[in-house]
């Protein structure tokens, strides 16, 4: 002996005339292999899909008013909770502490957007800027006062630019047409530059880095620097061309209704050189194609039933038939498809409408309107029920269409919204804030 103690288990000797353990096991397996193999495979798939996620540690919780009409918005690093019909409370997502509150005439939406470290109150044009830490006013009404006799104004901005655009409107001009527009500093609210066109214009903030495009009723189109207001390019196009305008990729797409359908024209953004023209006939079911808008990397013509147009060439890529097929929503450079019940069904390729990945059973945690410009991300957070009851959380990479496991939440949240670094979910009378791995 070498000094080690050995453990021996006596299994006994096989009885005379009976097969050994290995022979009995081999016979049992051979007789039942057709039934056992599918069960083993199903159990393995179930374990990989449902049972491998680690629980996410909860960070903080935020109380919600009782009742079925509780509402919240995620803006920057704050959760805004409708505490009454006229007041919203601002809660810190990192600590759950209530920082300050805001009096609002409407409890449906908080009416703020976070841009460049400032909360901009845009319910009535460019009203005021607020400090997100305290709720104190940083400025108020500078551009609104400059508008003079304008009856109302519209504010547009994008994250990271530091400057927004305010358009001033008379009640006497057609809807959406401005008689003057301004570049305003988002930190101070002061007017940086001003433009007073000869004719009423439609104004949009487009592109990256952002440019200000104005299209007059007489067809005069101009591109301006957002920071300085300096004109970068200009040309005259057919009158009425800019009834609607949008930008997808590096193409400015202008649209107007014609006798044969929607007339679309695409121009290179930055130079406005000659581009393409396309007439999209009316839908087969009758009616009109309205509106024309950017859909991810494409341009959509129509509301529910839509024609998807390639902005580079004007080619009609595919058609969304909501009555026969499915509802879609652009996210990043893809489309989310929903079935007739409004439940998520798949991820579609923007250029072909082809199904890239089935997402049946998952729910998308989409940023709310208050998340502001630039809220779309390269990945989308999805949730689905898991045993427990718990909720599985994954990240959908919109480029590769792959799912990455993020963990599990306790319970079954009613709805979730993402924020930079995590997820906020409503469960009954509380908001739960969760950190998500990258």
Image (spheres, grey):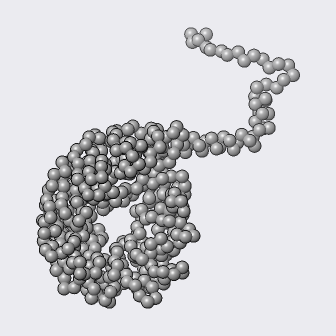
Query: 139 above or below 325?
Result: above
Residue shown at 46%/40% (left/top)?
A: 411
Residue shown at 36%/59% (left/top)?
A: 376
Percent coordinates x, y for residue 365 in the rendering: 42, 53
- Which residue, as the protein is rendered here, is positioned at the far right? 17
Percent coordinates x, y for residue 325 in the rendering: 56, 68
Residue nearest the observer in this picture, 86 or 77: 86
Q: Quadrant of residue 331?
A: bottom left
Residue shown at 22%/85% (left/top)?
A: 199
Query: 163 above or below 424?
Result: below
Residue nearest the observer in this picture, 103 or 296: 103
Task: Please indicate whether residue 338 sits to the left or right of residue 192 in the image.
Answer: right
Q: Would residue 288 be seen by someone viewing this image from the given angle? A: yes
Task: Please indicate whether residue 293 sits to the left or right of residue 170 in the image.
Answer: right
Residue nearest the observer in this picture, 58 or 42: 58
Query: 274 above or below 334?
Result: below
Task: Please indicate whether residue 327 sits to the left or right of residue 14 in the image.
Answer: left
Q: Would residue 80 be seen by someone viewing this image from the given angle? A: no
Percent coordinates x, y for residue 368 in the rendering: 36, 57
Q: Quadrant of residue 300?
A: bottom left
């Amino acid at each position: 002996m070498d000094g080690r103690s050995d453990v021996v288990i006596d299994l006994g000797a096989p009885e005379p005339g009976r097969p050994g353990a290995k022979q009995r096991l081999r016979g049992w397996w051979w007789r039942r292999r057709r039934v056992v193999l599918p069960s083993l495979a199903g159990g393995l798939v179930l374990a990989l899909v449902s049972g491998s996620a680690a629980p996410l540690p909860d960070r903080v919780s935020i109380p919600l008013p009782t009742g079925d009409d509780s509402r919240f918005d995620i803006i920057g690093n704050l959760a805004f909770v409708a505490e009454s019909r006229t007041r919203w409370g601002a809660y810190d997502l990192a600590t759950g502490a209530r920082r300050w509150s805001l009096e609002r005439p409407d409890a449906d939406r908080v009416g703020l957007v976070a841009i460049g470290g400032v909360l901009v109150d845009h319910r009535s044009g460019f009203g005021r800027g607020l400090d997100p830490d305290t709720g104190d006013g940083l400025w108020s009404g500078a551009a609104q006062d400059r508008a003079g006799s304008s009856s109302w104004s519209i504010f547009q901005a994008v994250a990271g630019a530091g400057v927004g655009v305010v358009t001033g409107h008379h009640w006497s001009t057609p809807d959406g047409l401005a008689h003057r527009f301004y570049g305003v500093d988002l930190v101070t609210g002061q007017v940086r530059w001003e433009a007073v066109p000869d004719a009423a214009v439609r104004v949009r903030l487009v592109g990256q880095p952002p440019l200000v495009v104005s299209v007059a009723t007489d067809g005069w189109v101009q591109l301006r620097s957002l920071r300085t207001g300096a004109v970068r390019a200009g040309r005259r196009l057919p009158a009425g061309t800019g009834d609607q305008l949008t930008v997808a990729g590096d193409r400015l797409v202008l649209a107007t209704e014609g006798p044969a359908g929607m007339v679309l024209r695409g121009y290179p953004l930055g130079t406005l050189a000659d581009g393409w023209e396309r007439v999209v006939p009316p839908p087969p079911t009758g009616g009109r194609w309205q509106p024309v808008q950017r859909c991810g990397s494409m341009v959509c013509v129509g509301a529910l039933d839509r024609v998807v147009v390639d902005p580079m060439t004007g080619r009609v890529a595919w058609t969304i038939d909501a009555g026969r097929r499915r509802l879609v929503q652009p996210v990043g450079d893809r489309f989310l498809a929903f079935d007739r019940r409004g439940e998520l069904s798949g991820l579609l390729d923007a250029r072909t409408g082809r199904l890239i990945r089935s997402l049946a059973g998952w729910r998308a945690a989409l940023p709310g309107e208050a998340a502001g410009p630039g809220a779309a991300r390269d990945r989308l957070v999805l949730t689905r029920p898991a045993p427990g009851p718990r909720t599985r959380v994954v990240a959908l990479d919109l480029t590769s269409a792959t799912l990455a496991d993020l963990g599990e939440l306790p319970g079954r949240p009613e709805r979730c919204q993402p924020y930079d670094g995590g997820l906020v979910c409503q469960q009954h009378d509380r908001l739960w804030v969760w950190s998500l791995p990258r």
